[in-house]
Image (tube, rainbow, N blue to C red):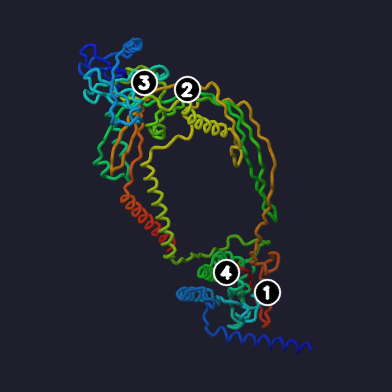
Amino acid sequence: MKHTRKVLTLLIALTLAFTFCVCTFAAGGRVYDEADVLSSDEESRLGDIIDEASAKCGAEILVAVFDDMADYGYSDIMLFADNYVESIDPYANSVALVISMEERDYWITTSGECIDYITDAGIESIEDYMLSYLSSGDYYNAFAAFSARCETLITEGRKGNIYDYTDGNEPEGYPETDFVAEHEFPAARSGIISTIVGALAALFSTSSMKSNLRSVSAKSNAASYAISDSMNLMNQDDVFLYSNVSAVPKPRNTDSSGGSRGGGHSGGSTVHVSPGGFSHGGGGGKF
Amino acid sequence: MSQLQEYKCPCCGGALKFDSSLQKMKCPYCDTEFEMEALRKYDLRLENQQENMHWESTPDTGWSAEEAQNLRSYVCKSCGGEIIGDANTAATSCPYCGNPVVMMQQFTGTLRPDYVIPFRLDKNAAKAGLMKHLEGKKLLPKVFKDENHIDEIKGIYVPFWLFDATAQASIKYKATRTRVWEDAVNMYTEISHYGINREGALSFTNVPVDGSKNIDDALMESIEPFNYSEMVDFQTAYLAGYLADKYDVDEETSCIRANERIRKSTEETFKSTVSGYATVEVESSNINLEDSKAKYALCPVWLLNTTWNGQKYTFAMNGQTGKFVGDLPVDKGKYRKYFAAIAAGVAAASFLLQFIIFR
């Protein structure tokens, strides 16, 4: 009975993996943008960057952005990401960033040697580099930052310098990744902003010039005619009357990044086994 | 009959004028100068001198009754020419011989001013003041400055009421303080309300109110302040060579404006003693004036009139301090050019800056 169940599970997993592979990943490449969050130029340049980073660190760095993982029958981003990686090469040393836009879920999944090189602390470090870009919709820089940090972590890991918690704290003195965000100049937006700024500046300046032509105005008070030191304050009292207090609920912190790696900074990578029977590390959340 | 006073030079018989730079009376014909004290005594003698010169004049049927009521006719003692002035004209010059004359009956009884501030600045200073006033005005039509000619320039003693008073104030203010804090769940804002009371006194002296209907009140308030330490007891001799009006807005009417200004200043001054609150506003104020008195003074003002594009522009200069005011026209073409140039320049700079930063 137990043997039958194992065989059945394996068959289902293989069927799913096959379906996934055939239907979805025929396009290939290290960047897959089903959701069209990147322009074709960005996708091309990003492909070059990630190819180069992968070659340098000797591991597969992958990025995939989907409209909705539910379209593929998934509701768990971790399982979805694991299956994505396994559908390409289940035995590769890889780290993949998988995003489902509908749920705004992301997951970084590691396989092979990368499980050791990119620990839970490493995942948090990657998130530190890329999440701000991801949250603001700057996907190009988010993926470039992901690639750059992965390259550093894997390269250093191969030298034995693994980014991991020391006594529950993040490591000190670990090399930073030299990442400079690229920005495409938003000409249309800048044009509108510049026009508004120019119009406001002109309005302010010409108003000032206009007011320079006006010098006749009635005086509002008689301050110039108050006799200095003539003020005699004979009685003063300040009485508290009442107070009212209003309470506004604080916005809840919805940032769940890293939360799926379990509590505590115990070091190393939290490893799980996918339905396909392969081990993965990683972490993710919402952006 | 109307009574005119001219100041004749004892040496040559020419008409004397008050010289603002010398602060003396001076004969423009023989350059003889006379001390004001000597003329003050002369003034006193004139007041006791009751002339009885009765002139019958036949009303011109061309004037309406209302017009005639506001007109006064005088005869120049020097040339015999007829001088027409309005009901408030107190000093002017003969249009025929140019001699300065003072209508003495405009200063009799309650109409006699208590004080006068003599002119310190002359007509040339007023002209120079206008030229300086036109400088540096980028939106001023070029032709206004280039082709501008002064239609009229006149030194006039403007009647002012000067009010002295001590304001006894009892003012209530509403004030709030705000405290903000938070816990794990909520952000809290506590607003505490206070009732503030201030009672006390504040004294004012020489709060001026223009006593002439003909002259724009805002124009006169714009050339404030006068230096009242130079104010002297009234003598008609100071008026020689200038125009002067008697007041046609009485003390009771003028005190309304003085009260407005005193009330505002009192509320603001006492409000400055209310500190440590996020907001303060006047809830009610009760201000009573004590030791209030009004003085009637003549203050020196140069009035200049120009016409441009069919519109009349009036400027005023404080004849004592030289403060010059007067609204000027806007050149709409220049305005559009400046607007376009600044907008284009700033927009281009902004675009370039963004390009450098974001590229």
Which labelled disc corresponds to residue A271? Answer: 1
Q: Secondary structure at mark 3?
A: helix
Q: Amino acid at mark 1?
A: Val
Question: Which one is in front in this view, the residue at disc 2 or the one at disc 3?
Answer: 3
Reading the image, the residue beneath label 3 is: B106
Please determine if labels 2 and 3 lie on a single subunit.
yes
Q: What chain does mark 1 sit on?
A: A
User: Can you give x and y, in whole percent of width and height, for residue B46 in the image?
Assistant: 33, 12
The reply to whether residue A117 is visible in this rendering is no
Number of residues whose C-alpha sits closer than 10 Å to that of mark 3, classed few (under 14), some (14–19) or many (20 or more) = many
Q: Amino acid at mark 3?
A: Gln
The residues tagged by marks 2 and 1 sit, at their Cα atoms, a distance apart of: 95 Å
Q: Which image quadrant for residue A84?
A: bottom right
Please determine if labels 3 and 4 lie on a single subunit.
no
Number of residues whose C-alpha sits closer than 10 Å to that of mark 1, classed few (under 14), some (14–19) or many (20 or more) = some
Reading the image, the residue beneath label 4 is: A153
The residues tagged by marks 3 and 4 sit, at their Cα atoms, a distance apart of: 101 Å
B77 vs A184, left or right, is: left
Q: Amino acid at mark 4?
A: Leu
Reading the image, the residue beneath label 2 is: B294
The residues tagged by marks 2 and 4 sit, at their Cα atoms, a distance apart of: 89 Å
Question: Which one is in front in this view, the residue at disc 4 or the one at disc 1?
Answer: 1
Locate the N terminus of chain A and report the quarter of the image it occupies.
bottom right
User: Can you give x and y, in whole percent of width and height, for residue B245 in the image?
Assistant: 36, 25
B166 vs A75, left or right, is: left
Pick whichever, B71 or A24, lies toward us.
Answer: B71
Locate the C terminus of chain A and report the quarter of the image it occupies.
bottom right
